[in-house]
Amino acid sequence: MVGNANFSRLLLITGLWFTSTLFAGPQIQSWQTTNGAGVLFVEAPEIPMVDVRIVFDAGSARDRDKPGVTSFTNSLLSEGAGEWSAQEIAERLEHVGAQLEVGSLRDMAWVSARTLTKLDALSVTLETMTKILAEPRFDPEEIERERQSILASLLQDEQSPGSVGKKRLYELVFGDHPYAADPEGTRQSVKSITRDDIIETHKRLYVAGNAQVAIVGAIDRKQAKAIAEQLTASLPAGEAVPPLPEVAPLQQAVTERIPFPSSQSHLYLGQPGMRRGDPDYFTLYVGNHILGGSGLVSLLSDEVREKRGLSYSVYSYFLPMRQPGMFQLGLQTKNDQADEALRVLTDTLERFIKEGPTEAELKAAKQNITGGFPLRIASNSKIIQYLSVIGFYDLPLDYLDQFVGKVEAVTRDQIRDAFKRRIDPERLVTIQVGRFSEPLAQTDSKGN
Amino acid sequence: MRSVMIGLLLMLGLCQVQAEVVEHQLDNGMKVIIKSDRRAPIAVSQVWYKVGSSYEHGGITGVSHVLEHMMFKGTENLEPGEFSRIIAANGGDENAFTGRDYTAYFQTMSSDRLEVSFRLEADRMRNLKLLQKEFLKEVEVVKEERRMRTEDKPTSLTYEQFLAGAYEASPYRIPVIGWMADLDALEMADLQAWYRMWYAPNNATLVVVGDVEPDHVIKLAEQYFAPLKPEQIARPKPRTEPVQKGIKRFTVKAPARQPYLILGYKTPVIGKADAPWEPYALEMLAYVLDGGSSARLTNHLIRGSKLAASADASYNAFSRLSGMLTMDAVPTPGKSVEKIETALLEEIERFKTELVSEKEMERVRNQIIAAKVFEKDSVFYQAMLIGQLETIGLDWRLADEYVDHLKQVTPEQIREVAQKYLVENNLSVAVLEPLPMENKKTVKAAAGGRHGG
C-alpha cells in the first residue's frame, strides 16, 4: 500500500507522533466508467495480487413484495453464466487459484474476487466475473437447487436462539420499512419466488448506474481503468435506484419473550440508529465505543462480564446504513439470570445516556481509536472494504484522512447530547429468546 | 478489450516482498522468531505456550482455557483488567485463544508499541496473581461461553460427542472448553498448579511479524523475557490412540430442525506417519474433496445428486498428535442422512479404485500456490503459521515448504493413503437426530415491560 509505505517512512524521518498528516489513509484514486459506474482504486504494489469488488444497491431493501429475491438472485450469479455451468465457472476460477465471493445484505449486494496478478489468473478471473455479472443463466435446475439451499439455511436459523432473536428484533424495530425483513426472506416467500422474479430483479438492479467498483492491488491506474471498464462494459447503463423510504422512530417500548429450548436466554435490545454520513456519526461512534463497542474494556463488558460474570459476550453497536440502521445491544446468559442481566444492560445504557462518559473514559477511547488507526488500513482486504463503503455511501474521498481528526474533536458534551437526542431508553424493543417461567402481562404491541 | 488488457498486464508481478525470518534463543530457553513485513507500520506479537486441552486429564478438562481467561485478571503488578486497558490505550487489538495443542496470546499494535506488549506479556508469564473473587466470576463467564458455543448449538454438541466417542486414549477426545461438570468442580488450586507447570519461558515461543527491525526486537526480548526464570517442564505422555478395531456409531438427540452427519477416519500427522509423504497425500485428498466449489463434494453431493445442502471435508497434517480426516454434511430438506452417508462413503471408495485426474491435481496446486501469496496480506496469519508449527514441535520452515511438499504428491500416493487409512475399521460416524423444538406462544408486552415484568 502506497499510503502505508509513506506513513512508515515519514515516521522514521520525523519521529513525530501525533502530526495529523501521519494519520493519512491510503491514496484513493477515483473516476467513472464509460457507462456510469463509480470506481475507487488504491495501488498496493507489494504483493502480486489484486482484489476487485463490485457493489450494487441491490440488497434486501430492494426486495419489493418478494422477501429474499435479491439475495436469491445474487447467490445464483455464479451458478451458471453465458456458456458456462456452475461447475465450469468454479473450475475456471479455481484452476488459476482465484477466490470468488458473492453476497448480499440489506443495502448492498456484491461480487468480489481475489486473484494473482499473473497474466492468465487475472484475465480468466475478470472474464469470468464479467460474464457472471452480465449474463447469469438462472437455469431452472440451479434455481430449484439454490431454493433448497436457502430453505436449509432458514431451517438452521430456526434452531439457533440468536438468529431467532435477531430476526424478530429487526421486524419490531423497522416495522413497515424494508429493513425489517431478513435478507434471506422467509420459508414461505422463498418458496414463492419464480424465475421471472429473479430475471426481473437482475435486470432492474445489476446495471452500471447502480454499481460501484473498488480495486486494490499491484497494478497501476491504467490497468485499474481497463479492469473497471471490462467489468462494467456488458452491463446496461441503467440508473441508480430511487431513495429508500425514511425509517420511522419507535412510538413506544415493546418487549417480546420467545420460548426456546435453550440453556441460555439471548437478549436483544434495539432502536433505529444512524445512517452513513450522519452528522452525528463520529460522536455516536466514539460514544458507543465507550459504551459497548470496545470489547473487554467497554462499560457494558465491565458491568455485565467483568463485575458480575453474567455473559461471555456483551456489546452495543450502531450499524450505519443508507437509512438509519440498527442501534443494538445484546448478551447471552443462562435462563435464570436473564432478568438480572437485562436490568444491568438497561441501567448501564440509561446511565450512559444521562451522564455521558467521564473525561478519562473519553481520553482512553480516543487513544484506542486513534492509536489503532494504522491497524484499520493495514491490509488489502481491509482497504477494499473501506473503498466499497466510501463509494457506496458517497462518503468523501478523504474520509480516512479525516478519521483521526474527527475522532479527536469529539467532546463529552457532544456525546451526551447526541445520545440524548438519538437514543430513547423508554422506547426500545427488547427481545428475550430462551426458557422462562413467569409470563409477562399480555398487552398490545406495535408491529404485530 | 481483452487484447488491450493483455498488453497492460504483462508488466506485473515485479515487486515481490522478500520476507526475512530471524530466529533467536534466550538463555532461559525461550525461542523468539521474527519476520519483517514492512507493508504497514504495525506489528503483531504472539506468545505461544505448549499447553492446551490435549495436555489435560479427566476431572480438570477446560483448565487451560479457564487459565487463559484468568491471564487478564491481574498480576503482582497489575489490577484485574488493567492489562487490557493498557493495550487499548496504546491503540492495540488483543486477545488470546486456546486449542488442543496450544494457548496463545496476542497484541496487534503500531510497531513502535512493541515494548508495551513485551513488558506486559513477560509480567504475566511469571507473575500472575490468581484471585478467588475473580476466578469465581470468570469461571461463570466460561460456562456461559460453553452454553453459547456448545450446549445450545446442536451441531457443535454432535461434534463434541463425536470426538469424545471416536477417540479412546487420545486426549483429542477432550473438548477444549471442558466438560460442564469439570468446570463446575474446577478450583483455584487446579489453575495454580496448571500455571506453575506450563507458564515459563522454556515452554513458550514469541513470534513477531510486522514492520520491525529484528535486532531491535531481539534487544527488547532480551530486556523483558531473558530475566524470567525457566521451569522444569514435564514432557506430556504419548497417550497414543490404540488401533481402532471396527466402525463406531453415535447418535445425538437434541432439539433441532435439521439432521446432521459427521464421519471421521483415524489418520496420522506429520512426524507420526509410516512415510513422511503420507500426511501430504491426505492433505491433497482433502483438497480434492473440498478445496473450493469446483471440488468433489460440491460438484457431486450439492450440485449433482443434490443430497446435501452443505458438505465439508477437513484434515490437518499439522498437529501434535494424530487425528482424523473428517467429513460433515447437512442434508437438503427432505433428503435422508443415510443417503448422504452412502454418498460420502462412495466418494472415499473412489479414491481407492480411481486415480485422481491430473486436472484436479493441477487445480489444487494452483490454489495452494495462490493462497501462499494471499496469506501475505495478513501479518496475523503469518505469525499464526509460525507459532502453531513451533508449538506442536515442528519447524516453522515447514510452512514455506508446504507448497513444495504438496506439489510432489502423486495420484498413486493419494490412492495408497486412501486404501491404507480410509477403511471401515478406522471409521466413526455421528448423527444428530432432531427432537421437536418447543412451540409455546410468544409473550408480548408493551410500554414498561422491558425490565422483565
Image (cartoon, rainbow, N blue to C red):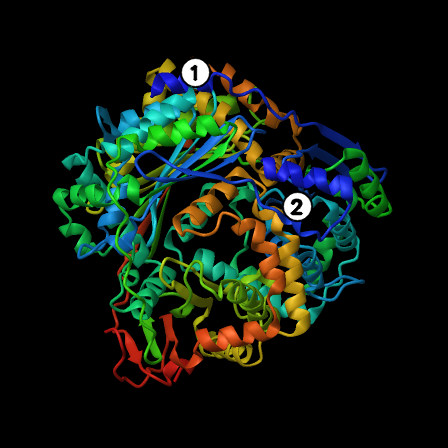
Q: Identity of the amino acid at label 2?
A: Val
Q: Check disc 2: other Cα within 10 Å, few if <14, some if 14-19, many if 20+.
A: many
Q: Is residue B275 above or below residue A171?
A: above
* Mark 1–mark 2 CB contact (< 8 Å): no
Q: Check disc 1: other Cα within 10 Å, few if <14, some if 14-19, many if 20+.
A: few
**Of the pair A387 and A157, the residue shown nearer to us:** A387
Task: Please name the residue that numbered disc 1 is placed on.
Answer: B7
Residue A293 located left or right of residue A142 = right
**Of the pair B6 and A120, the residue shown nearer to us:** B6
Q: Earlier in the sequence, mark 1 or mark 2?
A: 1
Residue drawn at x 75%, y 31% as measured from the top left: B23
Q: Is residue B339 above or below residue A248?
A: above
Residue drawn at x 31%, y 53% as measured from the top left: A156
Across and down, in percent, residue A413 comes to 59, 75
Residue drawn at x 43%, y 16% as measured from the top left: B7
- Say yes or no: labels 1 and 2 on the same chain: yes
Q: Identity of the amino acid at label 1?
A: Gly
The numbered dot on residue B57 is none
Q: Can residue A361 be seen at all in this image of the molecule?
A: yes
CA separation in Å, label 1 and label 2:
54 Å
Across and down, in percent, residue A75 comes to 28, 41
Task: Please name the residue that numbered disc 2 is placed on.
Answer: B51
Location of residue B379 (image quadrant): top right
Q: Can residue B235 be seen at all in this image of the molecule?
A: no
